[in-house]
Amino acid sequence: MYEIHYQVVALARFLLTVLYRGPIFSARCARIGKNFSLDGLPYVEGHVSIEIGDDVWFGGKVSIMSGRMFDQPRLVIGDGAELGWNVGITVNLEVIVEDHARVAYDCRISDSDAHPKQADLRAANRPPPLDEIRPVRICRNAWIGNGSHILKGVTVGEGAIIGANSVVVSNVPPFALAVGNPARVFLKDVGLPSTAPAAEPKPQE
């Protein structure tokens, strides 16, 4: 009975996704690729343009929010990328998650501070200055550990790993491990491809 219970739950969730969640979210996106799957209907607020590649997975309780600072804020999720449960993305200009990048659960990505630094402007509910809104890029094959925050203007390099609960305020080079608050590079040449590319054949004489 225990196994039957969860099989029924899984079937109900599958049907809900195929018949309702998937179609309604697809209608909200500017582009959506093949084999997109999701565990819950993402919450989207604002006029952000959402572009999703092939073979992408979203966990449940994903939120995507944008303000009116720029006319065309843009979120791009590349092929094979994954957003875990309870991921929040604030995009007022541009956030790009490249192919096969993985963002674990409870992560936050934001291209702005959401509020001005000046206390009087915050009290007046003024938006942040436009020059302090800077795009974020998570490069291909990068892995963002659970509970991490990626802040404005940051590029996480190809294949880089961000340790759990880190706060990333500056760029992380490719194939590096960065941890802490603020995150600092702890190791380099981490996660390099396990196989070297095949050598090109030599021309025959």
Image: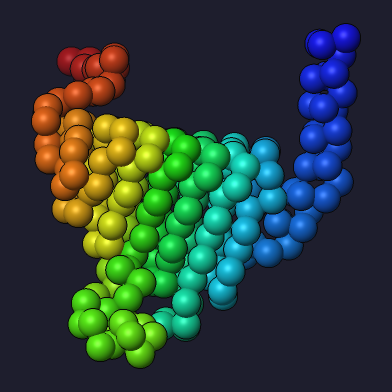
Quadrant showing the N terminus: top right
Indicate left or right for 73 with 7 as reference: left
Residue shown at 25% from the left, 23% from the top = 191
Along the line of sight, the residue nearer the viewer: 43 or 19 = 43
> Can you say whether 187 is above or below 22 in the image?
above
Residue name at image x 31 percent, y 82 percent: 122
Colour logic: rainbow
Q: What is the quadrant of residue 153 in the picture?
A: bottom left
- The residue depicted at 29 percent of the width and 73 percent of the height is 133
Q: Is residue 34 visible?
A: no
Q: Quadrant of residue 189?
A: top left
In the rendered structure, the answer to whether residue 56 lies left or right of residue 72 reads right
Q: Is residue 69 above or below residue 88?
A: below
Q: Position of residue 171 (x, y in %)?
A: 18, 50
Q: Is residue 43 above or below residue 81?
A: below
The answer to whether residue 62 of the structure is visible from this angle is yes
109 and 126: which is toward the camera? 126
Quarter of the picture holding the C terminus = top left
Q: Position of residue 79 (x, y in %)?
A: 51, 42
Of residues 169 and 173, the one nearer the viewer is: 169
Q: Residue 200 placed where, x, y %?
A: 25, 21
What residue is shown at x 62% (from left), y 58% (from top)?
43
- Where is residue 19? Give x, y as percent: 86, 46
